[in-house]
Image: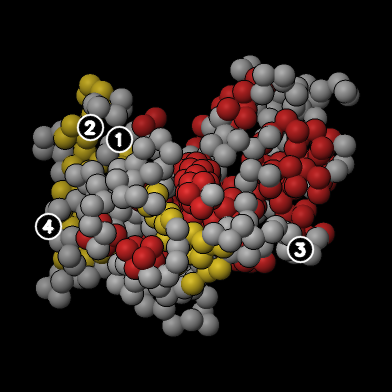
C-alpha cells in the first residue's frame, strides 16, 4: 500500500464567493476535482480497526471506498458505497460527518480528519456524470411491502427491500418524492435534480412511488394490510408538525414556521421568478432558533432579497446545534447573529402585520437535562428590533394523523411512534423509523433506521413464509 499523505488539513473544497452566492440559489460548494479527491483520499491511514465505519449509521465501508479512489477507480468507489447507502449524493452533501464518521477518524486526533463526506460526494457526482442509470437485476420474491413517506428513511428502507426482491410501493402525501430532501433542504445545499435522480434510480430498480397519497385520509394502514395485499408496512412519515413559542403576535401576518417557509421556497419554487409563489419577500427577517433548519431559513431569506437577516438564539455559539459548516457559511454571507436573546413578543400593526419583535437578553446558568447551560433572562434587558417577517424554527413533532387512524399504535406523549430495537411497533406487521419515531433528527440517522427496519421486515416475512411452508407439508 502506498504511503499515506500526512498533510494535516483537508484539501479545501472550492466554493462560490460569499457575496455572490448570498444572492443566488446555486450550490454553495463546487466539489472536488479528480486530483483533489485522490489527494484527500491518500490522507486515509486505512486503519485496521476502522473506527469511521462504526460512526456511520448505515455502515458505509469507508476505508474500502477511499482506497478505491486512491487507485483512480471512482466508479468502483461509488458501487462500494451503494452496497449500504442508497443515497450517496445526498449524504455526501447534508450528513453531519463531523459528528459521525469523521469524528472517529484517527487523523482527527491531532489534525483535521479525512474529508469522508467530500469524498462521498465526489464519487457520487462522478458516477452521475459518467454513467447512465441501469436497473438492478433482482428476482422477485413474491412479497409486497408498503412504505409511508418518501423521505430519507422511507427511501432507505425501500431501497434495501427492493434489493432483496420485494415489491415495494412508497405512498407520499406530497406531489413530489423526497420528503424533507425536497421540501426542507434548500437548493443551494442540495440541488433538487440530485434528489430526483436518486429517486429515479430506485424506481428503475423496481420501487414504485405513489404521490398525493395521504395515508390516514385516502387509505389507512389497516386497509393497506388487509385489502391491498401488503404483508408489512413501514411508517416513515417524518416530523412535519411545527412547534411555536406561544407568545403574543405569533398569529400575525408575516409569521411563518420554518417548514412552511422552506416548503414554499423549495417545493413551490419561490426562488424561481417563473413561479407565482405566495411568500413575503421582506426587508428585515428574524429567524428564531439555532439549528440547521434555522440556518437554511435565514440563508434562504437572504437569497429572496432581504437586506437584514437575524438569527435569534437564546444560547451562545458554543451551544448552537447547527453544523459548524452551516453557521460558518451563514456568517460569511452576512447573516447577523443575535445570540443570548429570546423573543418576548412579536409586534404587529393595526392590520395585524409584523412590524418588529421584542427580545430579552439572556445569560447562561447551570446545565439543563440536555447538558447545555440553561439560558436565563436578564431582568430589565428588553429591547426591540425592526422586522417585517418572523420565521419560527424550534423543531417539529410527528403529524398525529397516523396515530389517529391506526388503532393500537402506541406513541409517546409528544407523538413519536414507539418501536423496539428492530423498528417494530405495537401493531403486528407495522414498523416505523426516522423522524416519525425520534422527532426531527438527521438524514443519515433516519436512513439508518430504514435499514434496520428493512432487515427486520425481511426476517418477519420470511419467517411467515417458512411457517406457511411447514404447515403445507
| Residue under numbered circle 2 | 375
| Residue under numbered circle 1 | 315
| Residue under numbered circle 4 | 248
| Residue 41 vertical placement versus 253 (above, below) | above
Give coordinates of residue 458: x percent, y percent. 53, 47
Residue drawn 81% across and 25% down? 5
Q: Earlier in the sequence, mark 4 or mark 2?
A: 4
Q: Viewed as shown, does residue 73 lie left or right of 205? A: right
| Residue under numbered circle 3 | 134
Measure the alpha-carbon separation of dots 1 and 4.
Answer: 22 Å
Q: Viewed as shown, does residue 92 lie left or right of 235? A: right
Q: Earlier in the sequence, mark 1 or mark 3?
A: 3
Residue drawn 59% across and 31% down? 101
Q: Residues within 10 Å of mark 3 (few under 14, many from 20)?
A: few
Give coordinates of residue 257: x percent, y percent. 30, 60
Q: Nearer the viewer, residue 82 or 251?
A: 82
Amino acid at each position: 500500500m502506498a504511503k499515506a499523505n500526512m498533510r494535516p488539513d483537508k484539501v479545501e473544497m472550492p466554493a462560490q464567493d460569499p457575496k455572490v452566492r448570498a444572492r443566488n440559489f446555486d450550490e454553495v460548494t463546487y466539489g472536488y476535482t479528480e486530483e483533489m479527491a485522490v489527494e484527500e483520499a491518500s490522507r486515509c491511514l486505512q486503519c485496521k480497526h476502522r473506527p469511521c465505519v462504526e460512526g456511520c449509521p448505515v455502515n458505509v465501508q469507508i476505508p474500502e471506498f477511499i482506497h478505491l479512489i486512491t487507485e483512480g477507480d471512482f466508479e468502483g468507489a461509488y458501487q462500494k458505497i451503494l452496497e449500504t447507502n442508497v443515497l450517496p449524493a445526498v449524504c455526501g452533501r447534508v450528513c453531519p460527518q463531523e459528528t459521525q464518521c469523521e469524528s472517529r477518524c484517527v487523523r482527527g486526533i491531532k489534525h483535521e480528519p479525512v474529508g469522508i463526506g467530500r469524498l462521498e460526494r465526489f464519487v457520487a457526482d462522478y458516477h452521475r456524470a459518467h454513467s447512465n442509470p441501469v436497473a438492478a437485476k433482482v428476482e422477485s420474491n413474491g412479497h409486497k411491502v408498503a412504505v409511508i413517506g418518501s423521505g430519507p428513511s422511507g427511501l432507505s428502507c425501500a431501497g434495501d427491500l427492493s434489493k432483496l426482491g420485494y415489491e415495494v410501493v412508497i405512498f407520499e402525501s406530497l406531489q413530489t418524492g423526497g420528503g424533507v430532501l425536497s421540501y426542507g433542504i434548500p437548493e443551494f445545499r442540495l440541488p433538487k435534480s440530485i434528489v430526483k435522480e436518486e429517486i429515479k434510480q430506485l424506481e428503475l430498480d423496481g420501487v414504485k412511488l405513489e404521490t398525493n397519497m395521504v395515508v390516514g385520509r385516502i387509505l389507512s394502514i389497516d386497509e393497506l394490510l388487509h385489502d391491498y395485499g401488503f404483508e408489512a408496512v413501514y411508517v416513515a412519515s417524518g416530523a412535519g408538525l411545527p412547534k411555536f413559542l406561544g407568545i403574543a403576535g405569533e398569529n400575525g401576518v408575516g409569521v411563518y414556521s420554518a417548514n412552511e417557509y422552506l416548503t414554499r421556497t423549495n417545493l413551490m419554487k419561490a426562488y424561481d421568478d417563473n413561479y407565482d409563489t405566495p411568500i413575503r419577500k421582506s426587508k428585515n427577517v428574524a429567524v428564531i432558533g439555532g439549528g440547521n433548519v434555522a440556518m437554511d431559513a435565514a440563508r434562504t431569506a437572504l437569497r429572496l432579497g432581504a437586506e437584514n437577516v437575524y438569527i435569534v438564539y437564546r444560547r451562545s455559539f458554543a451551544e448552537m446545534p447547527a453544523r459548524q459548516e452551516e453557521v460558518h457559511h451563514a456568517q460569511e454571507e452576512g447573516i447577523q447573529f443575535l445570540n443570548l436573546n429570546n423573543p418576548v413578543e412579536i409586534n404587529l400593526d393595526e392590520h395585524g402585520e409584523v412590524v418588529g419583535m421584542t427580545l430579552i437578553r439572556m445569560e447562561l446558568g447551570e446545565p439543563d437535562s440536555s447538558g447545555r447551560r440553561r439560558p436565563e433572562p436578564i431582568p430589565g434587558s428588553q429591547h426591540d428590533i425592526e422586522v417585517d417577517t418572523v420565521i419560527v424554527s424550534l423543531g417539529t413533532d410527528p403529524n398525529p394523523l397516523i396515530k389517529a387512524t391506526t388503532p393500537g399504535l402506541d406513541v409517546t406523549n409528544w407523538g413519536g411512534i414507539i418501536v423496539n430495537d428492530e423498528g417494530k411497533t405495537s401493531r403486528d406487521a407495522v414498523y416505523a423509523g426516522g423522524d416519525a419515531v425520534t422527532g426531527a433528527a438527521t438524514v443519515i440517522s433516519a436512513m439508518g433506521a430504514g435499514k434496520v427496519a428493512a432487515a427486520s421486515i425481511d426476517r418477519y416475512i420470511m419467517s411467515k413464509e417458512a411457517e406457511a411452508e411447514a404447515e403445507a407439508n
